[in-house]
Image (spheres, coloured by chain):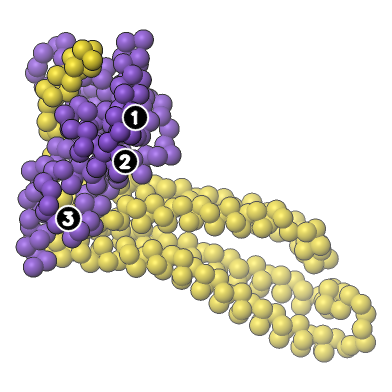
Chain colours: A yellow, B purple
Amino acid sequence: MDLLDKYKKAWNNQPKETDTFSALEIYKLAHSKSSSVVKWIFIIALLEFVLWSSLNLLMPEDFYKIYRDLNLMHFINIFTIFHYLIIVAFLFLFYKNYKRISLIDNTKRLIKSILGIRKTVKYYVIYNLAMVFLISIIVNITMFSDSDKLLKTMNPNNLTMDISQVLTITIITQIIVLIVVLVFLWLFYKLLYGILLRKLNTNYKELTKLDNLN
Amino acid sequence: MQKDLETKFLTDFEKNQNIAHKICRIYTTNTNAHKDLFQEITIQLWKNYSKFRGDSKFSTWMYRVALNTAISLYRKSTRTVKTQDFSDFAYKIKATDYDDTEEKQLEALYKAIHQLNDIEKALIFLYLEDKPYKEIADTLGISSVNARVKMTRAKEKLKNILNP
């Protein structure tokens, strides 16, 4: 045991931590869980990215048939690449937020960066919803601009229907589907990021209170 | 009541924070991770403070909560030491003036501890802090016999790393 005893003496004589925290700083540490919330925002965004992209990859070829029929395949490919670039940029921002917020020890800067993070998340959700909206508008415009194509895509079995019937049915279904998808996505984001943002908000309020006390 | 409790917690913790810093030093290898762990320990201590009845000393209770926080947080993290990360901390030790050989010993000791797994780290830490087996067992939630067995193994491993 003599070997370890020697080290034990060194351990007991080690200097005390010079970088200590005051009671106020400890209060802040105990009450601000912001950095872990931001970490979760990053992790969930990452998981979401994996989920959507694997769904994309797992889609059967048939799914793209409608785009191919509409001659939109080229556009869809370019759009997908563009979309993933934007998402990766967002992921990078989330990661940077997380790294930054775990370093901050100043109340004012923490408040500022929480505001920044809330904005980033908001833009992220808006971007995703807007993209769904935009892409369906583009697909629909291409579809309606050419009545032959429209008939071919919407009525592949050549049922006896005239163009105005097909048009009405298509418009109604498209609008319903778009609304349902947007509402579903909105709820999804609201639930997922809403909970995290609410936590961040509580921290924000506490921090402002604390900042006012000083 | 809540305010009184909080003030008491803050003053007690402020006085004993060196325990948490030492734990951070053995479980992390750079300043950022040190701060993160310290914050996590602070959060856990405050969350559990209402359950602390004062039948043991604040420091004893703090050893338990802080060590368990570190163990559960670093359970899955890697056990390799990054030398460039370590130098960050080594610099901090050198900044104070004391015996050169002890300084080298301490550096070697930390390097060796960083190679142990999360439970071994806790055992060695409590040994270095001169805790009796009864308290070590209570802190880690194992039996005294088990603590003795595990401690012997951890010490052997540490000695082998220090003096291969």
* Chain under disc 3: B
Q: Position of residue A112 (x, y in %)?
A: 26, 57
The residue beneath circle 3 is B52
> Which of the two labelled residues, at mark 1 and mark 2, occupies the earlier sequence position?
2
Which residue is pictured at 22% across the width and 33% down the height?
B133
The residue beneath circle 2 is B142
Which residue is pictured at 83% across the width and 73% down the height?
A153
Which quadrant would residue B110 be assigned to in this image? top left
Q: Position of residue A192 (x, y in %)?
A: 46, 65
Q: Give the residue at the far front of this rendering.
A: B145
Q: Is residue B83 left or right of residue A124?
A: left
State how far apart marks 3 and 1 are (Cα).
Answer: 28 Å
Which residue is pictured at 71% across the width and 59% down the height?
A76
> In this rendering, does residue B70 appear at all?
no
Looking at the rendered structure, the kind of residue marked 2 is: Ile
Residue A12 vs residue A76, the one in the foreground: A12
* Chain under disc 1: B
Which residue is pictured at 41% across the width and 68% down the height?
A194
- Dot in front, 2 or 3: 2
Work out whether B66 lies above or below B157.
below
Work out whether B163 lies above or below B69.
above
| 10 Å crowding of disc 1: few (<14), some (14-19), many (20+) | some
**On-image quarter of the N terminus of chain B:** bottom left
Q: Position of residue B111 (x, y in %)?
A: 30, 21
| 10 Å crowding of disc 3: few (<14), some (14-19), many (20+) | some
The residue beneath circle 1 is B150
